[in-house]
Amino acid sequence: MSREEIERRYRLVRDAMEEQQLDFMLVCGSEYTGFEGAVTYLSGFVIVHRYAYVLLPREGDPTIVFPAEARYVGQHGTSWIEDQVFVERPGKWLGDRCTAQRVGVYGMDYVMAVRDFEAAHLRIEFVPFDVEFDLARAVKSEEELSSVRDSVRINTEGFWAFLEAYGPGKAAGEVLAPAERVFVEAGCGRLTMNMVLVGSEFAMAREDTVLGDFCIPSLEIAGPGGHWVEVSRAIGDPNAEVSRMLEAYEEYFEAAKGGLRPGATAHEVHRAVSKGFSDRGYRLGHVTGHSIGMTMIEHPKIGEGIEAELRENMVFSMHPHVIAENGEDCLYMQDTWLVTADGGEPLAGLPMRIFRAGETRP
């Protein structure tokens, strides 16, 4: 990570802190919740076990705070933060450090350990700062976009491996295993979250999940740079209902190219890309899309009533989850998009279609 990139990140967050009149910003991250990317974003440290906090003052140097038992559960030398604190009760330490200060918190509702909140909250004015932090880091630098593109490349390679292994009657675990090997060998480590859809529901790819003649993989990974992406396509022989859904998917894909542009709101993009589905009477399940970065799901989401404006070099995962009236027929295909001055750019380069079993890459 270049010094310029580190300083850029801190500057963006501090600008947002200034608007809220915050004295500190506290990022909470835990290996068990999926919020660990926020800690990595501000410190370079990858949580292996337990949890950690990054405390960024509006002026001065940051501190990364660990519970004492986390001293040997991560490569602490990978963090660019020099001030590394190991204490029995991080909440007490934070309370002492920030007494009577106004502290914006990212991840408090989902991550912050109860024992630390109880120890600190009487001496600190906690201010929810989740949305502001996500918006501050939503616009990617060229250095970050290089990492995003690398993750997309790896994810796409994994899709081709999944497609090559797929066949009706095979176990989902058997089909996903070659893709996971691609991901791990490329440096993703544990930063993968890959499933298949059974009917309209997401399911783990286990050996007892047998794939039929139509398969929907959900492939989500972060490459060595730590940026999450999502790329996948449905595979097999669609029935008449799913073929009709595909028509709406083709319309979404074209609408996203024009809709994902600077100045558009997330609400406007949602309306544009979901029109083909709603016109056909379909309902959507999982969110239409969302900002994606070093945490898998970031603000803003692409959805109804979200008035956040898009800016150039934001990155979004788009995946309309369309479900038929019977609750079973479903289509869900993922792409990672870049907002450019000319509109949305799908980074994987895969055509928007359903692939066939046994198909090989061009």
Image (cartoon, grey):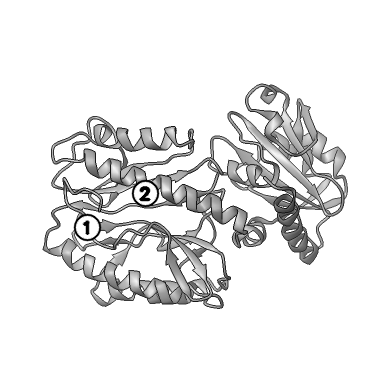
Residue 199, above or below 275: above
Say what amino acid the circle numbered 2 marks. Thr
- Indicate the position of residue 131 as horizontal and vertical percent values: 63, 60
- What residue appears at the point 64 percent right and 55 percent down from the top-left corner? 130
Q: Give yes or no for contact between labels 2 and 1 (Cβ–Cβ under 8 Å).
A: no
**Residue where numbered disc 2 is placed:** 156
Residue drawn 25% across and 36% down?
175
**Element carrying mark 1:** loop
Who is closer to the viewer here, 49 or 227? 227
SS class, disc 2? helix
Mark 1 residue type: Ile
Q: Residue 239 appears in which quarter of the rendering?
A: bottom left
Height in image: 170 above or below 126? above
Q: Residues within 10 Å of mark 1 (few under 14, many from 20)?
A: many
Q: In this view, does 325 lie to the left or right of 161?
A: left
Task: Note whether residue 267 is visible.
Answer: yes
What number is the disc on residue 354? 1
Q: x and y percent of residue 187 in the render?
A: 49, 35
> Residue sitting at 70 percent across and 36 percent down?
79
Of circles 2 and 1, the one toward us is: 2
